[in-house]
Image (cartoon, coloured by chain):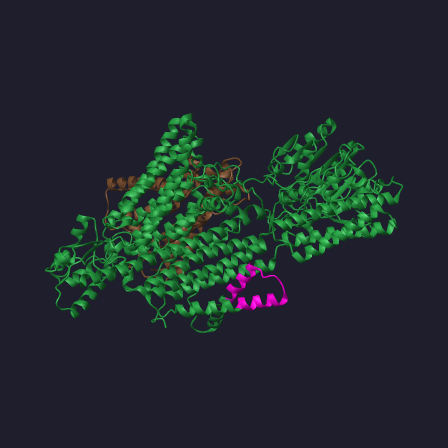
Chain colours: A green, B brown
Amino acid sequence: MNILLSPRMRKVSVLLFLAWVCFLFYAGIALFTSGFLLTRLELTNQSSCQEPPGPGPLPWGSHGKPGACWMPSRFSRVVLVLIDALRFDFAQPQRSHVPGEPPVSVPFLGKLGSLQRILESQPYHGRLYRSQVDPPTTTMQRLKALTTGSLPTFIDAGSNFASHAIVEDNLIQQLNSAGRRVVFMGDDTWRDLFPGAFSQAFFFSSFNVRDLHTVDNGILEHLYPTLDGGAWDVLIAHFLGVDHCGHKHGPHHPEMAKKLSQMDQVIQGLIERLENDTLLVVAGDHGMTMNGDHGGDSELEVSAALFLYSPTALFPSVPPEEPEVIPQVSLVPTLALLLGLPIPFGNTGEVMAELFSGGSDSSDPHSSALAQVSALHINAQQVSRFLHTYSAATQDLQVKELHRLQTLFSTASARYQHFLRDPQEAEAALSTLTAEFQQFLRGARALCIESWARFSLVRMAGGAALLAAACLLCLLASQLAVAPGFLFCPLLLIPVAWGLTWTILYAGVAVTTGSKIDSVVLGAVAAAGSLLPFLWKAWVSRGSKRPLAPLLPVPRPVLILLLIRLATFFSDSFVVAEARATPFLLGSLVFFLVAQLHWEGQLLPPKPLTISRLGSSAPTAPPRHGGARALWLGIGLLLFTRLAGLFHRCPEETPACRSSPWLSPLASMVGGRAKNLWYGACVGALVALLVVVRLWLRRYGNLKSPEPPVLFVRWGLPLMVLGTAAYWALASGAEEAPPRLRALVAGASAVLPRAVMGLAALGLLLLLWRPVTVLVKAGAATSRTRTILTPFSGPPTSQADLDYVVPQIYRHMQEEFQGRLARTKAQGPITVAAYQLGSVYSAAMVTALLLLAFPLLLLHVERVSLVFLLLFLQSFLLLHLLAAGTPVATPGPFTVLWQAVSAWVLLATQTFYSTGHQPVFSAIHWHAAFVGFPDGHGSSTWLPALLVGANTFASHLLFAVGCPLLLLWPFLCERQGPKRRLPGSESEARVRPEEEEEQQEPLMEMRLRDAPNHFNAALLQLGLKYLFILGAQILACALAASILRRHLMVWKVFAPKFIFEAVGFIVSSVGLLLGIALVMRVDVAVSSWFKKLVLAQQR
Amino acid sequence: MKDTDIKRLLYTNLLCVFSIFLSIFIPSFFVDNFSVLEAHLTWLCICSASVTTVNLLSYLVVKPNVSSKRSSLSHKVTRALKCCVCFLMSCFLLHIIFVLYGAPLIELVLETFLFAVVLSTFTTVPCLCLLGPNLKAWLRVFSRNGVTSIWENSLQITTVSSFIGAWLGAFPIPLDWERPWQVWPISCTLGATFGYVAGLVISPLWIYWNRKQLTYKNN
């Protein structure tokens, strides 16, 4: 079956196999993501005073009153004391001990005595609640919830990724638009969330988790003076000491007792200073675990304390024995209505109705109950309006449940209107109304929680398992691929059949049960189904004597290095420091490569000792250039890596680090002279890049052919350099242009980048159209009379050195000639000299890479061109170094070593950082969207997304496309490599028959063509190995994110890292497929070229 | 290879280990508030000096490679001078290598250089003692089947383990534990020291363990 496949079919099946493996990874990533990253759409609608949330009269006709919106205000001022991580039991009153039982002495219990005193002495004035927090329990997400009333998820798909500012309607914004003065002191997270929203603010850095006192003491310095000064309507104090104490010492530490006692004094002091129109709210934003961490959804993390107090009586009844449990977001509608503000548009909280009863002094139970119901009604109207708007904007919410809720609301609302017009059986009617509104509000909240705020552990585990299985598949298949008798067809057809079967099965089940078909689950089912036969095979052969493949064929140091790299994904410090750790690992790998070469005795000319041991029959003669070439390659690589490391952007988490100033655009520089120098350096880097590649091409003789891609390389590339340089000149000096030329400059800065990108696209198309850049010399007409292969009669070295070309004859072609000649005896001998056949694949690859690099470079700031130059030099040196250690197995099978693939991936990661990127959203280079589009894009979103994505994942793309070079380069280096000639045979070579002479000629990449099956297998193996390493990285990221989902840094470090790795994986896999497809395209073109040549010769 | 040779190797190596311990404990009698972490640079100098001394002494006493020909005084002096130059060169070379591997270029130059000095004390000084300023011999020792005696074998093991220790010492630096020893280059110097000590202890044992398999050309 295998033999029946035509070469072209085999190529297609290699690509399809790789695409299937990619699909497995994608399905795993998608499944994991859908369980881990919950998304929600941010609506920017605002509630306003003038516009009531629904039809019907507002209670008490409150329109006309000043300071009242949807309801009249009960308090004119609020003091909100936010104690970070104030768990419920920290504030829980301690009942007097049962005699005989020893008193429990836990540092955090019973330290907030002032609350207990209030609850005992003034039961109508204050109340303690256990507030139920929604995960993720991180401070920023909690603050969003506490001001918007919604359920923040990790990705709030809003319009603004770059800053953390809240765009949804929120309490602070409502306060501002009502003209209230908001004074803030404490955690500086608020500054990011509400830029410019406070009339007075004292921010303190929340960065140092080990510092217990700076923030709190800073607040205390300002709290009482501000309070007494009176220039505020809402005063917010956000204390961080308790949270930091938890992170540093854990709750069971005497320090926690001290911290809580300090907080107690603060509350006591505030209570003494409060006036009658002021409400005091003491709230914890989340709890903490036994170890003092938070972020997840365990019981201790999600229970926070909430305490309300006012000097006037608030509540109609004494507090219950056990404090009531309320959702934390209930505070939002309650505060809004108590202050006479509209409820924020996206609020899903339920108002705390008992606060609207008018306190114990209201004698009339009927009016009290009516006030409660009307508050609930407004709240329900607002939530219903939000649900309606949200479900119109997106399909997140379950339709059926939504319908049920809407019906519930409309009936309750109709009954409420009816009751207002015709109040009968007041008590019973009001209590049913209360129950119905509450039922609606709770149902709505449950609906939102269901779709926004739960990790789906099943999906996360399933996704991780799928990723792990795909990695295993890659590992085993990469071993099998080069083994003889590897069957493509069954390996492709069986999974597809299985996958389809399972998909149909799943779809059938889904249709019969009537549930909606989830495309993510569908993809995962298909992937898992197609993996099943493979897993089964692996399981079966596990026990058998002959395992599927040797377990891990990686050399041990490389394996250790890989494991270290994977382990670093589990430490937030290492993820943050990856920009420094990756070059270190890369350097270690380079060192290992050089050391290995030395250890094997290949680095330096062998010493007499080794020679004598190996004997004279040693087949591996020293490399021609000899000496410590590999050593210099390694040192150069280290040097370039270090230089590239000078371009780095600091992550937010390391305040001591200073970003490289070279990553800012030239336009932001002030000094004219320095700017000019830098500009010169950037253009110089561009020119150097071009010159290096052209020199390389010329060295292998690929600049001689009259083919269009070669002409493009000769003329189009300099044009691109010119365009880029002109664009940079305009961009860096746009402000200095004289006013008359402004329009011209603006036009040019739009046209130039587009022209360069168009040229690059043209070049790539040309390359795809005619990828064979081979010069054919000495046509049949002139050489008929000569004997075969006369151009090679001289010593090949001298000719090569003279012309800088590699004259190549393809052996098969000769055989074919001979075969045909045998049939057509009439023809005379033919001479053909084909130049640069030996590097035909890599020449196309390098040209394609350069053509890709130019548009990507254009998307970066000018000075990154130096990094791109370094990138090309680094990969050049690395390829040479790797080639020095890779044996060229002549008839095949060809293999790509693990160290090569690992080094390539490390280099890609290092370049990601040195081009000024960081795996956090705030570090994305948004300006890339405006390259070539200085006035923005209007309404289209895919083009800017594409530009920004290309900027961010430029290194992933370049290295993935260039991946096949790892396979090609050892053949390319064969010229300098071994087997030139045995010593002493120089004179014999001259007199040898010509056929043998021709065999001496290095075949270089034609060796690959000689064995098309091995070539395909090697490409498949290369792709699988690359995918394995990338897949292992993404698996490590996914595992880290799921295991550490309660970690303090999960939303700041691990989740963004996972997202960047995932997108990087997708970009890389697409690039890999493109690169391999390009090589295959060249291969096909070379075949047809030979065919044409043969036909032409025949004629 | 005789067992007495291995015993001699063990004693010399233990002497080197002992000298490192001495460099940790002796200075506290003379300097107030001496500790390895706080007065790190001082300790580096002392450690380097003591290890060099012990190496030289043990070389002079044990004389592992018996040279057949007597050499003149001037030859000896040139040889010693060459050794010094070699040592200095290796310090500078290591410094450059550290910078290439990510050490700060301008800040903490003294610290980086002293680390280079210590690492070359652990690696270059034994090489110089054993092999002399002969680069070819060095390269031979560090290649497959290149060792010709247990002394060279031990040298190979201690040198490689010192380098590995220094390499491993770089890993705690990015962690946020905020320990005093995480500062560059303390963790690396400590790692190199541990690696050196481990190499010194392990190499005689390893040679003893594998004495049946080990065959040296010259023996």
Specify start and end residues of the magenta stretch as a single range: A502-529
Residue A114 occupies quadrant: top right
Decide whether residue A503 is among the magenta residues. Answer: yes
Give the percent coordinates (x, y) of residue A447: 68, 54
Q: Is residue A221 left or right of residue A641?
A: right
Q: Is the magenta stretch mostly helix, strand or loop?
A: helix
Give the percent coordinates (x, y) of residue A360: 86, 41
Q: In this view, does A256 lie to the left or right of A1019?
A: right
Residue A267 occupies quadrant: top right
Decide whether residue A608 is among the magenta residues. Answer: no
Instruction: Let me know if residue A144 appears in the view.
Output: yes
Foreground pick, A458 / A374:
A374
Q: In this view, does A837 lie to the left or right of A53?
A: left
Give the percent coordinates (x, y) of residue A195: 61, 35
A388, above or below A542, in the image:
above
| Image quadrant occupied by the C terminus of chain A | bottom left
Foreground pick, A539 / A92:
A539
A576, above or below A214, in the image:
below
